[in-house]
Amino acid sequence: MSGQANISAKDLSPRAADRVGGTKKLVKDICIYILLVIGALFYLVPFFMVIANSFKQKKDIIKAPMDIVGAHGMSLDNYFKAFKQMEFLKAFGNSIFITGLSTLAVIVLSSMVAYYIVRANTKIAKLIFALMISSMIIPFQSIMIPLVSIYGAQLSLLNHRLSLVFMHTGFAMSMSVFMYAGFLRSGVPKSLEEAAYIDGCTKMETFRLIVFPLLKPTTATLVILNAMQFWNDYLLPSLVLGKKPLYTLPLSTYSFYGTYSSDYGLIMAALVLTLLPILILYFFLQKQIIAGMVAGAVK
């Protein structure tokens, strides 16, 4: 009895309580939250300053860029001027067409390729998967000159939106196949497919009606990741689209940068107009994105 009493007293000591949780854990959590808040501020402050400066005049931005409200107050003139000068509706239509078609192509093709690689499980499938994963380490800058040379000088396929869609789709396939394959291996039971085969479904019907709906978390994640990449991309569109009527929104914002001076208020307003659609998309898909990020992590 005395031994049990001693053990109980030891277990209930403040030091043991601190090891399990208690005050030490609380202090640790507070320190972590403080560090996270500080880190978030470092990332968010520039974004908030872009929004604040988009309502200010150029001279107010140059004089006091960190002020929330300029000496001449806040105004929407920058947004109206940017909307008109960057031909927002035309550039927005080009961005929607290129981003939407590229994202759709990536989702459809990568999900089918991943399904074949996982379920076929042959040497050819493993070789294809290994080659796709290996291609992820190749930087785009190392192939952009040959790419433009081949498509421009030899095939004359530049200054076409579909050419950019084709390139976007090709560059995004490897990562998308990798994520789909990981989820298919652990998140989609093969017994469901076998039951569909017994009911008379073909492989294509099984994939379309049974497998693909189960890939919703990963699909939502890839939609937002690829859409953000295509929407915000500047380098590849600048190499492929050389005519102003074909410009996307990131290319249109470059028209506000002059040789000797730039109107920073218009630039900030144009940046906000460019980012707003993709932020709205993220807002509606954020739950699916979080679920897709951890999908397949635990088998």
Image: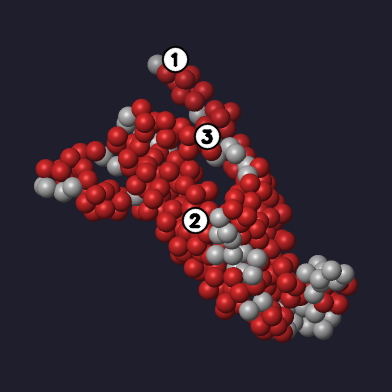
Q: Amino acid at mark 3?
A: Ser
Judging from the image, what secondary structure is the residue with disc 3 in?
Answer: helix
Q: Nearer the viewer, residue 9 or 241?
A: 241
Query: Is residue 167 something that shows in the picture?
Result: yes
Q: Amino acid at mark 1?
A: Gly
* Secondary structure at numbered mark 1: helix
Cα distance in 3D space between marks 1 and 2: 75 Å
Q: Residue 234 at what x, y percent from top left? A: 65, 59
Q: Which residue bears the numbered disc 1?
A: 3
**Residue lying at 44% horizontally and 15% vertically, measured from the top left:** 3
Instruction: Give the residue number, with chain letter if any, for mark 3.
Output: 134
Look at discs 1 and 2 and give the one toward the viewer. 2
Q: Quadrant of the N terminus?
A: top left
Residue 82: quarter of image: bottom right
Q: Residue at x 43, y 35 (%)?
A: 129
**Which residue is painted at 59% across and 50% down in the image?**
150
Q: Residues within 10 Å of mark 1 (few under 14, many from 20)?
A: few
Q: Is residue 34 above or below residue 194?
A: below
